[in-house]
Amino acid sequence: MSLHKILFLVLLWAGFVVQGQNKQLLYDFVEIPQAAMVNPGVEADFQWYTGIPALSGISFQAGSSGISVNDIFANDGQRINDKIRDRAINGMTPRDELSGTFQVEFLIFGFRGRNPDHFFTGGMYLEGDAIGYWFKDYAVLAFEGNADRLNQRFDLGHLKTRGELVNVFHFGMNKQVRDGLTVGGRAKIYSSIFDFNSTKNRGYFVTRPGESNIFVSTLEADMQLRTSGLNSLKDSFDEENTAGTVIKRALFGGNLGLGFDLGFTYHLNEQVVLTASLLDLGFIYHTNDVKNFTLNGTATIEGVEVVLPDAFDDPNTDFWEDLVDDVENFVPFDDNTNSYVSFRPTKLYASLRYNFGEPVEGRASCDCGVNAVRSPANRAKYVNSVGAQLYVINRPRGPQAALSAFYQRRFGNILSMKAAYTVDKFSYTNIGLGMSLQAGPMNFYVMADNLLAYRNVAASQYASFQLGLNIISWGAR
């Protein structure tokens, strides 16, 4: 395989670090304290709880909306070059998404106030989020070149990507405002470790037959890459002090921002429950360690003697440096340290749940029958719950949605299981399963999505898991 195809494969698979942030199994799973993190208006029946540091909440998601590893590397008798061309280059579109997230909680706690209708939460977690859309025209140009594509415009707007690593401090409260309605809110302070984004690119590159030369190429570009925190991380890596730099930037030494979460739970009647939440309605203001790059202008170039993709095949030709030098003479590259604002990927959840079966006796030393209580702290749960959930996340190419149906089964106060079937742009066969186990004051939960894909992991386009350990007290109510 030629050098340019190897480089292309590296870029292709480096991008497949996964899918979005939907936590459909955790949402409204009220036995787990972390359910408050996806709906600050959740009904909490705890007296207090705390997480085991760095183990209370760990989540990771990975996948691709385009192709899987198996699509390219399966031993199916087809040439790998043909599979790359048919399934990746021509098979994917600029709307195919390569995105991912992880989250690690370092601190989480919750406690009931003097007024039992008030419940407070707080903590700190580290979150990484990244997304890149398939840069189709760039891939075509790198893999096939422009020799056979005269007069074709390669769209520079296909490059859309953003990513960040941020430490989040949060504190919130929820309250029963009237019988059957609980509302909650949470304030967040973001401490950015690094950020990059290039989402508003426009322009094109086209090659036509020339007059003074064989070819004439026109480049019209309005492109920008904004970054913060990357220079300090690079310097710390050279000085072997990366951990110290990350910790400093995570503890208010990075660029700071502010955000809010909102949510509610409303009982339409004793067995039908409506919930919704809006998360990460916030921004980060990047003022320090900022480095931005721009390419802006229009030029027609006649005489740049670089023929793609053949130029990749000669390792002794430093054609990239020559090409950049030539392009810079026509279209100005620039860099600056201008401050900028980045907005968090806002998320919306909503659900409608129907409870049925026998009520589950509560842990409190009180009369917790169905008709005897109304407060969130001692409202009876039911053995069975079914319902539907909606999830929407704001992304650079517009909102991304998912729809889930779920069933939850409680086995007393010890064990609760939740199964969900989810449909989104990544999979139509996503079946997930979550479990919450209560052993005295210790709560352990584990969740995994897309279980059917584990029969052939290489053919999977999506995988996700969550797990955590908490200590819970119900007290006497």
Image: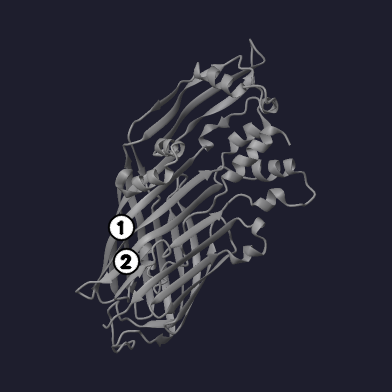
Q: Is residue 330 visible?
A: no
Which residue is farthest front?
240
The picture places residue 168, in percent across and down from the top left corner, at 34, 53
Which residue is farthest top?
212
Q: Find numbered disc 2 in the image and state the secondary structure of the residue it sits on.
A: strand
- What residue lies at 59% left-to-right and 38% top-to-bottom? 136
Left or right: 443 with respect to 259? right
User: In front here: 315 or 93?
Assistant: 315
Q: CA distance from mark 2 to mark 1?
A: 10 Å
Q: Quadrant of residue 309?
A: top right
Q: Find numbered disc 1 in the image and state the secondary structure of the residue it sits on.
A: strand
- What residue lies at 46% left-to-right and 30% top-to-bottom? 223
The picture places residue 243, in percent across and down from the top left corner, at 42, 46
Q: What is the image's colouring?
A: one colour
Query: Please, is residue 401 above or below residue 325 in the view?
Result: below
Which numbered marker is on residue 88?
A: none
- What residue lies at 45% left-to-right and 50% top-to-bottom? 129
Amino acid at circle 2: Phe
Residue under circle 1? 170
Which residue is farthest right?
77
Query: Please, is residue 225 above or below residue 162 in the view?
Result: above
User: In front here: 13 or 97?
Assistant: 13
Left or right: 46 with respect to 435? left
Query: Please, is residue 257 above or below residue 460 in the view?
Result: above
Q: Comparing marks 2 and 1, which lies closer to the viewer?
A: 2
Of the 4 image quadrants, the one containing the N terminus is top right
Which residue is farthest left?
114
The picture places residue 105, in percent across and down from the top left corner, at 40, 60
- What residue lies at 67% left-to-right and 25% top-to-bottom? 311
Amino acid at circle 1: His
Residue under circle 2? 109
Q: Is residue 130 visible?
A: yes
